[in-house]
Image (cartoon, coloured by chain):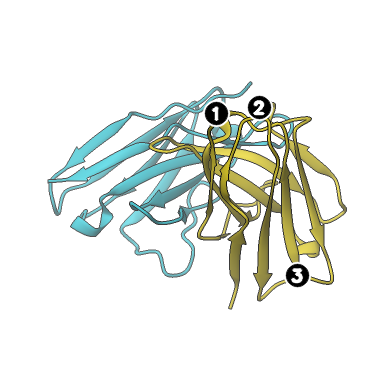
Chain colours: A cyan, B yellow
Amino acid sequence: SYELTQPPSVSVSPGQTASITCSGDKLGDKYLCWYQQKPGQSPVVVIYQDTKRPSGIPERFSGSNSGNTATLTISGTQAMDEADYYCQSWDSSNHVVFGGGTQLTVL
Amino acid sequence: EVQLVESGGGLIQPGGSLGLSCAASGFTVSSTYMSWVRQAPGKGLEWVSIIYPGGNTYYADSVKGRFTISRDYSKNTLYLQLNSLRAEDTAMYYCARGGATTPFDYWGQGTLVTVSS
């Protein structure tokens, strides 16, 4: 089965750049999405098709995907960005696969 | 406005059954990919099942043979029937639009299923 690996936690200072990675075999050959989930809330897609931002998502969120690693980058991180982030792609059967999630702390 | 509202969760004994519903508005459930995703307490997201516009259905290995996804065109509602429930099925269950090469662009608020004696 296909697996996506994320670091359990990432810390960043306010105003700095946060980078959250997601790794998987030949991940760059697949489309990848990123979801933000705040405590007690449902997930929200912040990046889809590797690099695209849905309407309403701030420009400080960006994504890349190449080789075996995808990266979610948050520039000028704000306190409101503190949340869990999940990467998501598809396996060879087009079934959804989620990464284990990364807790982003802004301190 | 697109909206998804789940219902049907609750406390159920191991081995029991439960039916979840997801009422949709603002779009037609039968014309798009619809999925169920669950999240155990304090854990990550886990894809459970998907139904295609053409009616094909697929399941995660962890629930195959026990859960059944379906939809009702007239009620514009997605369903998930949970049978032979186990303690490890305890989770918040979300319905979401998307899932087959498309992102989950809308999520419901979730309904909590607790399997315990």
Q: Is residue B97 left or right of residue B41?
A: right
Q: Is residue A50 left or right of residue B101?
A: left
Residue displayed at 46% across by 53% down: A43
Judged by depth in the image, the label closer to the viewer, 3 or 2, is 2
| Chain name for mark 3 | B
In the rendered image, the quadrant that contains the N terminus of chain A is top right
The percent position of residue B21, horizontal first and vertical second, equals 68, 58
Q: Nearer the viewer, residue B78 or B102?
A: B78
Q: Which mark is residue B62?
A: 2
Query: Is the Cβ of the residue at disc 1 closer than 8 Å to that at disc 2?
Result: yes
Q: Is residue A71 left or right of residue B36?
A: left
- Could you tell me the amino acid type at mark 3? Thr
Separation of disc 1 and disc 2 at Cα?
10 Å
Separation of disc 3 and disc 1 at Cα?
32 Å
Residue at the disc numbered 3? B28
- Could you tell me the amino acid type at mark 2? Ser
Please tell me which of labels 3 and 2 falls first in the chain: 3
Q: Is residue B71 left or right of residue B13?
A: right
Q: Residues within 10 Å of mark 2 (few under 14, many from 20)?
A: few
Q: Which mark is residue B88?
A: 1
- Could you tell me the amino acid type at mark 1? Glu
Residue displayed at 49% across by 56% down: A52
